Image (spheres, rainbow, N blue to C red):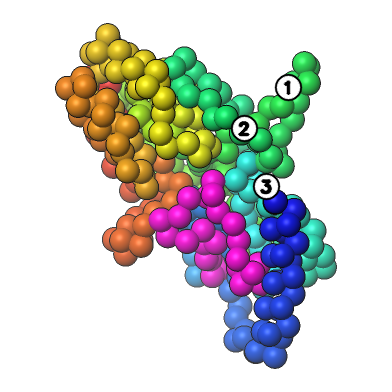
Amino acid sequence: MKKVFLFSLLLAVAFFSAVGAGTATAQSDQLNIITTVFPIFDFTRTVGADHVQVSQLLPPGADSHSYEPTPREIVRLQEADLFIYVGGESDAWIDSILESLGKDAPQTLKLIDSVRAVPEELVEGMQEEEGHDHEGEHEEHDEHGEEVVYDEHIWTAPQNAVLMTQAIAAKLIEVDSSNAAAYEENAAAFVKKLEALDASYRGFIEYAARKTIVVGDRFPFRYLADAYGLEYYAAFPGCSADVEPSAATIAFLVDKVKADQIPVVFYIESSNHKVADTIASATGAKALLLHSAHNVTQAEIDAGATYLSIMIENMPKLHEALN
């Protein structure tokens, strides 16, 4: 089915390319950059500033785990100077699309290569998705021949955000060396803010009363948990498409919250948070949003949301959960 979808998509791309061939576009000194998820968009516009025009491929409020590009969006890629993406399982479609574009493909930057990626894992009580095919292009096999799929939510640790920012700056300098000084200066200033964010997280987590969080939802916070020594329990892995956990999964999380007297159960953005509400109702805990910054809604865009603002808003909620 995926091959059929891809073939149909490429035919449609050819159609839209032909339709738009006679349409002239205004020339600009700005680099035309397309990104996939919100953190990359935010990092790139911060580093590039006035020298770049950045757009996000993933529509506001959409989920990259179920995203499929439209023909018009593929045409947008053809017109870009640079395409920046994570390179995890949700980006499995990208290699085929870029290959199909041939000489018309833009320059690219795959950010999962800029950090130390870790495998997506199943922890105790977590529901494994049946039939999950792990078809990401960033996958390997261990010594037993088992498929290893890397967790793609690399930005949730501020230290990784630093590495991603530096990688973006280096690529912008490579593509547009005439503005190298500006990119270096912007990246350095942003890195200082990210390092301050990291220090703030480290400061309150180090002295927290507990080091365990419970997420009644998918878990895209593996890198955050690893960075600050947090133990976690969740309903699903980070890339799961499931929304209804088994009774056993809910019972396990309810028992864990009760046994450890955990005061907060988290849910993530774009969630109906029914699972977290169910656990909270059964335990007396509070259900709160822990935003992974994976994507934002149009309302959040209009309100000026940034990666930093989202991560800062998460801190008091984490503080409450850990104390």
Give the number of the disc on residue 92.
3
Left of 11 or right of it: where is 321?
left
Residue hosting label 2: 131
Counting residues from the start of the chain, the first of labels 1 and 2 encountered is 2
User: Which secondary structure lies at badge 1?
Assistant: loop
Give yes or no for contact between labels 3 and 1 (Cβ–Cβ under 8 Å). no
Secondary structure under the numbered disc 2 in the rendered image: loop
In the rendered view, tell whether residue 131 sits above or below residue 70. above
Q: Earlier in the sequence, mark 3 or mark 1?
A: 3
Question: Label 3 vs label 1: CA separation?
Answer: 19 Å
Instruction: Tell me whether circle 2 and circle 3 mark residues in contact (CB < 8 Å).
Output: no
| Disc 3 residue crowd, few under 14, some 14–19, many 20+, Cα 10 Å | some
Which structural element holds mark 3? loop
Residue 63: where, in percent of width, then height?
48, 50
Residue numbers of the magenta segment: 51-77
Q: Alpha carbon of mark 1 to alpha carbon of mark 2: how far? A: 15 Å
**Label for residue 146?**
1
- Amino acid type at mark 3: Ala
Judge from the rendering whether residue 113 lies leftward or rightward of residue 255; answer left or right: right
Place residue 219 in its image quadrant: top left
Residue 27 position in % (x across, y down): 62, 84
**In the rendering, at what x and y percent does residue 220 appear?**
47, 35
